[in-house]
Amino acid sequence: MTKQNLFDAKSCVNSTMFVVEMVSPPPPPPPRGSCINNISRKTLVEINGDPKIMKSWIDSMRASSPTHHMSTTLYEDKTSWMMRGTVRKLARYFPTAIVSGRCRDKVYNFVQLSELYYAGSHGMDIKGPSKGSKYSKKVYKELLDKTKSIEGVRVENNKFCVSVHFRCVDEKKWGELSQEVRLVLKEYPKLKLCQGRKVLEIRPIIKWDKGKALQFLLQSLGYAKCNDVFPIYIGDDRTDEDAFKVLRERRQGLGILVSKTPKETHASYSLQEPSEVMKFLLLLIEWKMLSLRRQSKIQKQLEEIKSSLNY
């Protein structure tokens, strides 16, 4: 599905809003002087006996991890602290939640806004499904050991899932990294491998994702069956597509993809970078403040009319 730039669209919102935002703390910078090169067929043969299978994995990793001169990750921008202030102000007027692949404690420690709802591990922290959690520590230790020879790899234990970040890994090593991760995963049939932007994630095989997290949040807040609630989900990662799809199927609310490059998405609109996200959120705040002022003015006028009739 094609997406439309939000600032190009003529649209208005006249209902209560629920805003969900994906957050990704900034990763460490790549080593100075590092470069990304195309992986050769010879390297593929050396890594795996079947180069076609390995090539498909690397192509998939490359497709989900586009290289940009300026990353579009929401919190890698210079305006991140201004964004934080904007989100805090937004939460005064709209129920606001952050849904992240990282564990909830890490997300909270990074954002540190008590006004928000937090959903870590792709929302699994909300409902707290226990399946798979007993494996995470073992898998985490095995992945640390298996990938320690690959420069730039960062393995992160997110309580209900384990993330292998390859943002700082030379592309020539992506095939080797993918193979090591899949070898570890073979020992755990109850876990599955998923891909995000320059990250491989090992998650429990349960029907839970950011879309389910969004549905649970709406249900918990009493908004699931409300016709006067307009959910908005802003995200920049492949894993946010589940939430975009939920909103599209509900036909109530909209998803906003943050990306500088055109891509297939279930989101209804797009914003190119964090500065545009902040501009959009500020417009929401301004709209709500004006709406409240109008309501207050109308209420005052009604009270004056009522008072005059009593005379």
Image (cartoon, rainbow, N blue to C red):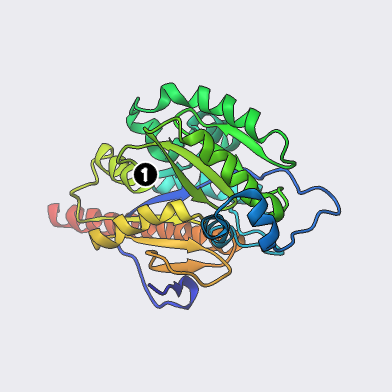
* Residue 129: x %, y % from top left: 33, 28
Closer to the camera in the image, 208 or 214: 208
Residue 5, percent from left and from top: 48, 73
Residue ranking furthest to the right: 33
Q: Is residue 150 left or right of residue 253?
A: right
**Residue 116 seen in render:** no
| Location of residue 283 in the rendering, given as x and y in whole percent from the top left corner | 49, 63
Residue bearing the label numbered 1: 209
Q: Residue furthest front?
A: 49
Rendered residue at 37%/73% (across/down): 11
Residue at 40% from the left image edge and 31% from the top image edge: 125
Judge whether residue 304 can be spotted in this image.
Answer: yes
Q: Quadrant of the N terminus?
A: bottom left
Instruction: Tell me if mark 1 has few (under 14), some (14-19) or many (20+) residues whose alpha carbon lies within 10 angstroms of its own.
Output: many
Give the left or right position of residue 164, taking residue 12 as reference: right
Kind of residue at badge 1: Asp
Residue drawn at x 52%, y 51% is 196
Residue 253 position, x and y percent, is: 31, 60
Q: Nearest the camera: 22 or 308?
A: 22
